[in-house]
Amino acid sequence: MAGCARDTVPASGQRVQAGAVAPADTDHFGAPLPMDARFAGRVVSLNPAATEVIFALSLQRRLVGRSRWDAFPAAAARVPSLGDGIRPNVEAVLAARPSLVILYATAENRAAADALARAGVRTIALRVDRMAEFHALVRVLGRALGDTATAQVVSDSVRRTVDAVRARTRGLARVRVVWPLWDRPLLVVGQGSYLDELLGVAGGDNVFHDLAAPSPPVSMEEVVRRAPDAIVTSARGAERMRQAVGWRAVSAAREGRFIIVADSITGRPSVNLGMAAVALARALHPSVAQTWP
């Protein structure tokens, strides 16, 4: 969450705003991207979306380390955990003897990328906050790991599913929603997040779409003022909001108008994006969900 809420700072010092896709030949820190698989014999992935893509490419045998956040797929648990993906323990990463380390491109990871480079380890640092960035990640990893054909299949499959959901919800009445991400401070989905994109695909309108950040902080008074039709959250989140005094001021919470989606499906911008779009569309439009294939 903290990483998603910040800009990145590449080597040039120029800030990269959320939603910016890295150039074809450099990552978001300005480092040259690997053009072949020479550096991919031993891979540490500290980017959960990248870890999931590596499994989707059936190249998990290359993984010698992951972050403690990498929970998907379940088989990722068999890869040694090296700790946090933000401000990682560089000594622990180097102890795994990686030839390539994949990082999430937040400014907080710049020092780690520099330290790994000084140790002679190649890095790929990319943001994955938007759908376009997911597809860019798949392309980069396909090239870096030596399987561009499978990478194209993975990317095309996700795109087709998302496009099919968008076509199915076109013309349906839009549901105005707020999607809280954190309680203290109150953070919600903003325009810079793939979750905002998923809402649009699935037939919803994010009442905080006008805020550019992926997870901007807002006040409860502002949520009340924007009067969402419903609140998108998990089952656990809905129960918490039912009991929270502050949320009683929001009519959607007070009246139990919750759109329940599983964090395990929507919580990461990776190969599950198509599944997340389907699940969200079904939750937003239950009256027509039963007619869907």
Image (cartoon, grey):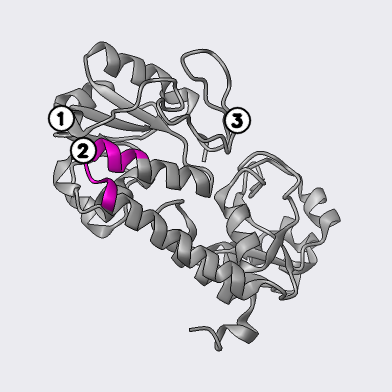
When asked about the image quadrant of residue 231, the answer is bottom right
Q: Amino acid at mark 3?
A: Gln
User: Pointer 2: residues within 10 angstroms few (<14), some, or many (20+)?
Assistant: many
Q: Amino acid at mark 1?
A: Ala
- The residue where tag 3 is placed is 17
Which sits in the foreground, 279 or 155? 155
Let me know if residue 263 appears in the view. Answer: no
In terms of sequence position, does the residue under pointer 2 or pointer 3 come before the other? 3
User: Pointer 3: residues within 10 angstroms few (<14), some, or many (20+)?
Assistant: some
**Given this view, does label 2 or label 3 mark the residue nearer the observer?**
3
In terms of sequence position, does the residue under pointer 3 or pointer 1 come before the other? 3
Tag 2 near tag 1, CB within 8 Å: yes
Q: Report the Cα–Cα distance between label 3 and label 1.
A: 32 Å
Which residue lies at the image location 53% right of the left edge and 84% below the top edge?
A: 292
What kind of element bears circle 2? Answer: strand
Q: Tell me residue 210's x, y (percent).
A: 76, 46
Q: Magenta: predominant secondary structure element? A: helix
- Viewed as shown, does residue 79 lie left or right of 114? left
Which residue lies at the image location 61% right of the left edge and 42% below the top edge?
A: 214
Identify whether 162 is placed above or below 6. Answer: below
Which residue lies at the image location 29% right of the left edge and 28% below the top edge?
A: 34
- Viewed as shown, does residue 58 lie left or right of 263? left
Q: Amino acid at mark 2?
A: Gly
Q: Report the Cα–Cα distance between label 2 and label 1.
A: 7 Å
What kind of element bears circle 3? Answer: loop
What kind of element bears circle 1? Answer: loop
Give the label on residue 65, or none: 2
- The residue where tag 1 is placed is 96
In terms of sequence position, does the residue under pointer 2 or pointer 1 come before the other? 2
What residue span does the magenta drawing correspond to?
140-149
Q: Report the Cα–Cα distance between label 2 and label 3.
A: 29 Å
